[in-house]
Image: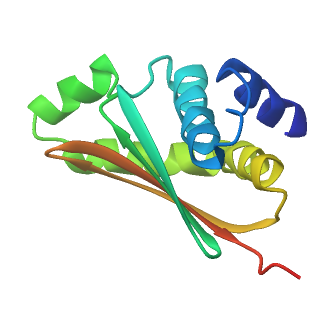
Amino acid sequence: MQDHAQELIDAAGGPAPGSLRAALANAMVGLKKRYYGRGPEAAKAYVEDDYIFVVLEGGLTRNEETLLAAGKADLVRQYRLAFQDAVGPTAMSAVAELTGRRVIAYHSQVVFDPMRAFEIFVLAPES
């Protein structure tokens, strides 16, 4: 997974000089683009103590949009949570590499109106 994390960071243009928040947002955009085939239109990361929150705007795939139009929001949410399990180690590795800290928990959630995905990371306390 470490190689995949570095690929995400490289695909996002590498870490932005002096901007951990931008590097984290870019890495999560890279993850969505690589594994979903489509990335969000905008992203912003927040770092507070031992927590990282990345908010991603847009980025639904065409099949997800079709399911939402058919009233299947729960199915899209269920799929995205299954996806989180599959790519969680890669996302956690990217955050650990960028922050220099161990990630002890990760959760992803999505809302549809407006379309936002939330990537939440809990970092191990600094020693």
The number of discs equals 0
Is 111 positioned to the left or the right of 89 in the image?
Answer: left
Q: Is residue 107 left or right of residue 67?
A: right
Identify the residue at image location x=44%, y=19%: 38
Q: Position of residue 53 (x, y in %)?
A: 49, 59
Give left or right: position of 3 versus 18: right
User: Could you say which is closer to the camera, residue 57 or residue 77?
Assistant: 57
75 or 110: nearer the viewer: 110
**Quadrant (top left/top right/bottom left/bottom right) for the N terminus:** top right
Judge whether 118 appears above or below 67 on screen: below
Q: How is the image coloured?
A: rainbow
Q: Which is more toward the observer, 37 or 74?
A: 37
Direction front: furthest residue: 18
From the top left corner, tell me how far across and down residue 23 is, in percent.
Answer: 64, 38
- Residue drawn at point x = 82 percent, y = 63 percent: 101
**Which quadrant does the C terminus fall into?**
bottom right
Residue 95, position in %: x, y? 71, 50
Residue 35 location (% of width, % of height):
58, 26
Point 54% across, 40% down: residue: 25
> Can you say whether 13 is above or below 17 in the image?
above
Task: Please give left or right for residue 65 compared with residue 103 in the image.
Answer: left
Residue 58 quadrant:
top left
Task: Choose top left, top right, bottom left or bottom right for residue 65.
Answer: top left
